[in-house]
Amino acid sequence: MQLLENAIREKGRALNSDVLLVDSFLNNQVDTALMAACGQAFAEAVRDQGIDRVVTIEASGIAPAMMTAMVLNVPMVILKKSPSKILNEGTLQAEVFSFTKGAPYHLTMKTAYVHPGEKVLLIDDFLAMGEAAKGAASLIERAGAEVRAIGIVIEKSFQPGRGLLEGMGYKIISLARVAAMSENGVTFGLADA
Ligand code: G4P
């Protein structure tokens, strides 16, 4: 997606060869017009799939997922990274190892909002190791629903996430695929949408 690649080139900053900072339009401040365009692109890519729900992981997945769900006219469901202190009845949990944080956490989904037989589009902001998306997909499937595709705003193609998820049979739709990055800039591979 050209608009997104332009934003990454102009506003992103490679902290090192592994980490891309996109605080100003995705992680800390949200460029709403850009997220709306991401939503259009994801929705277009799954147009004929009969998606019933968009599921995402808090926090930074919410903006692109919301925009996509609006275009598809379906609900958006948020998976939480910390269990509720009040009530965990009617929830499913999956342990996910975060390589960034160096520790595991529990992803929690309320079963009331994902039903057996539903077709789900899973959306997240970054694809790095693929552990978060793998955990989220396992929750959706344990609820009896089907993950029709995994939509990613920024894929770091030099990390193993895409290979892991494709190896499990998931279809990946990445709007920007970062092939490499350094202080000299970012190189992109061919995006999926
Ligand atoms: P995974 O998400 O593919 O499993 O890989 P990893 O464990 O490495 O990622 C953990 C967190 O770090 C996720 O966000 C992910 O989006 C983020 N992340 C990974 N690589 C980058 C990067 O190059 N740049 C930025 N800005 N983020 C990256 P999170 O901690 O869950 O954050 P949030 O969604 O609550 O904002």
Image: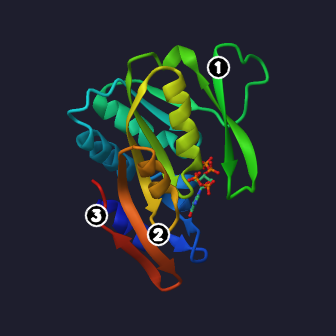
- Image location of residue 27, percent across then percent down: 56, 54
* Relative depth, front residue between 117 and 112: 117
The numbered mark at residue 11 is 2
How many neighbours does mark 3 have within 10 angstroms: few (below 14), some (14-19), or many (20 or more)?
few
**Amino acid, disc 3:** Gln
- Image location of residue 55, percent across then percent down: 47, 32
* Marked residue nearer the N-terminal end (2 or 1): 2
Q: Which of marks 3 and 1 is in front?
A: 1
Q: Which residue is drawn at 29% across and 30% down?
A: 72
* Relative depth, front residue between 30 and 119: 119
Q: CA gap, disc 2 to disc 1?
A: 38 Å
Q: Which residue is drawn at 31% across and 49% down?
A: 37
Q: Which residue is drawn at 45% across and 57% down?
A: 163
Q: Residue furthest bottom?
A: 184
Residue 52 location, quadrant: top left
Q: Nearer the viewer, mark 2 or mark 1?
A: 1
The numbered mark at residue 91 is 1
Residue holding disc 3 = 2
**Amino acid, disc 1:** Thr
Q: CA gap, disc 3 to disc 2?
A: 14 Å
* Horizontal side of residue 15 vs 70, given as left or right: right
Q: Which residue is drawn at 52% across and 20% down?
A: 143
